[in-house]
Amino acid sequence: MVEPLVSILVPSHNSARWLPATLGSALAQTHPACEIIVVDDGSTDESAAVAESFSDRGVRVVRQPQHGAAGARNAALREARGEFVQFLDADDLLAPEKIARQLTALSAAPGGMLASGPWGSFAGEAAQAEFRPEAVWADLAPVDWLATSWSGGGMFPPVVWLVPRALAESAGPWNETLSLDDDGEYFTRVLLRSRGVRFVPGARSFYRRHDGSRVSAGRGRRAAESSFASVEQKERHLLAVDDSPRTRRALALHWQRFVWEQIAAAPDLATLGLARMRHLAADLPAPDGPRAYRLAARLLGWRRARRLQLAAQRFMHR
């Protein structure tokens, strides 16, 4: 029996500190047929050299000027030859049997399904990772997964998924105009072209928390604009497939979280997001928060209370 080839795709920008462990976890996969492709996205540290030090173990390295996470992943996809795709950010880790377990589950599932699994976040050692089950840790139909996630049921970082190559090709490339939540927009398209998600309990992934450089940009005006554009596109993708009260409410909650996150940094975009939220579902409860915020929200409304909360946080961190 010929084992299916899995392409492990690693976008990297200034990740020299993390790459040895990340590539080590890719090379340690028990599935025997994996190719590992690192795209160095304009690093100014030793990332490319670190990646190339693994070339004698079969790791392929592509260097390019900086195009961001989506551009690096698209470059990796163009190089990939596998029947399945595993995205692996340069600071995350795979458990040794992650891919093998997901392939086994997909082999017993209907065609056109995605595989997911548990993920834990860690800051120091992977052994300290915290695995906190959420509602999306389940076998779910595509629309059910998205509605559950956007209603507060959790999310998955890219490392969790194992994607059949045919689904990736059907969904199209990563959107290179996005810098923040490019993964959310991309996997929305992948999910909506799939037959559903098969959750594999033993297929664990590890998401690293740190303040160092990431291939995705997470702060500033560009990040806020990217997040806004991503939610807009996700709304369009989902409503084209299922325009129902349930999906509209889930999208309204998604817009509410955008407003919560960007109300101080990008108030103009937050105002637009609030209008989308109200158009989709006008009766949402106020977001929850700490006791002081809740008291202020009763008196002033949740948006003013959120601004006060953020102002207090900035004052405390001076």
Image (cartoon, grey):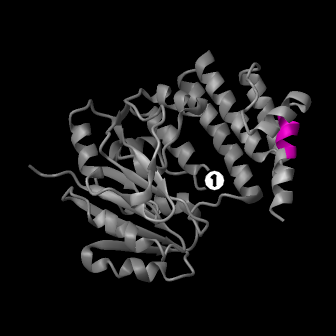
Using the image, determine if residue 231 lies above or below residue 23. above
Mark 1 packing: few (<14 Cα in 10 Å), some, or many (20+)?
A: many
The quadrant of the picture occupied by the C terminus is: bottom right
Q: Residue 160: say if magenta.
A: no
Secondary structure mostly seen in the magenta stretch? helix
Q: Where in the figure is residue 221, as x and y percent of width and height?
A: 77, 56
- Residue at (44%, 55%) from the top-left corner? 129
- Residue at position x 56%, y 29% in the image: 238
Residue at 81 percent across and 38 percent down: it is: 293
- In screen coordinates, is 201 left or right of 274? left
> For the magenta stretch, what is the residue range?
302-308
The amino acid type of the residue labelled 1 equals Leu
Residue 286 appears in the rendering: yes
In the image, residue 60 above or below residue 2: below
Foreground residue among 176 and 32: 32
Tell me if residue 254 comes above or below residue 53 in the rendering: above
Left-right relation of 244 to 219: left
Q: Position of residue 28 (x, y in %)?
A: 26, 64
Can you identify the residue that label 1 sits on? 180
Q: Residue furthest left?
A: 1
Furthest residue to the top?
245
